[in-house]
Image (cartoon, rainbow, N blue to C red):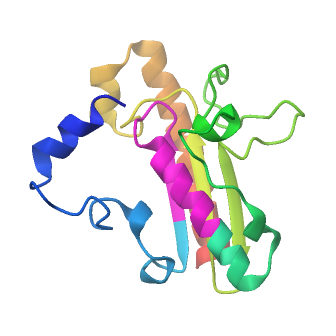
Amino acid sequence: MTLIPSFNWSYIPYGHNLHDPILSPSFADRNSLPPFVGLVAAELDILAHENWQLACRLAREGGKACGTAAANRGIPDPKSDDKKWSICGSEDVKSEFGQIDVLDETGKPDDRFGFEENWEDGGVKWMLVPDVLHGFDNKHVREYLGGEDTIKDAEAKTKVMMDRLGTWLKTVVW
């Protein structure tokens, strides 16, 4: 997290409102976004937590508007003492080669790594791809940042992620 201030300084004009939704969609009003929002993040990306917060907030707001169970969804907080809410992903989990499904301690899918909430006029899909860096889905970034095994794992996870997003778009959004 110590790099974020230098990134802010390097491309955000001095005095600019840091809560501008153009800089970070996490500050966008739900009504200014499309009815369906899909968010994908790399577990080892410094912006993953911000995306997870947005996904949870949108699910919560959509659930409140429609009276669904999603209205009770928690909102992650990196300052929380509870690691389940402070850490996007997990300190321990190492995924199987090419796998993006992560189970919690009870053997159920871990919501930190993915969930989908839908309501009558919209929804949100969240996917956190485990054990990958920012740009894992880009051939050039993979080749620059990874060795042969890392590249093959990222390619396999990219395929799974794209297949799931495509299915969601075809069956839910469109």
Relative to 67, is 72 above or below?
above
Q: Could you say which quadrant of the image residue 170 lies in?
A: bottom right
Residue at screen point 66% across, 19% down:
92
Nearest the viewer among 3 and 136 is: 3
Report the side of 136 relative to 55 (left or right).
left
Q: Position of residue 104 (x, y in %)?
A: 80, 34
Q: Is residue 119 visible?
A: no
Nearest the viewer among 166 and 16 is: 16
Would residue 45 be counted in the magenta stretch?
A: yes
Would residue 106 be counted in the magenta stretch?
A: no
Nearest the viewer among 173 and 105 is: 105
Magenta segment boundaries in residue numbering: 38-59
Relative to 16, is 156 above or below?
above
Q: Position of residue 38 (x, y in %)?
A: 53, 62
Report the side of 110 relative to 145 (left or right).
right
Q: Position of residue 161 (x, y in %)?
A: 56, 46
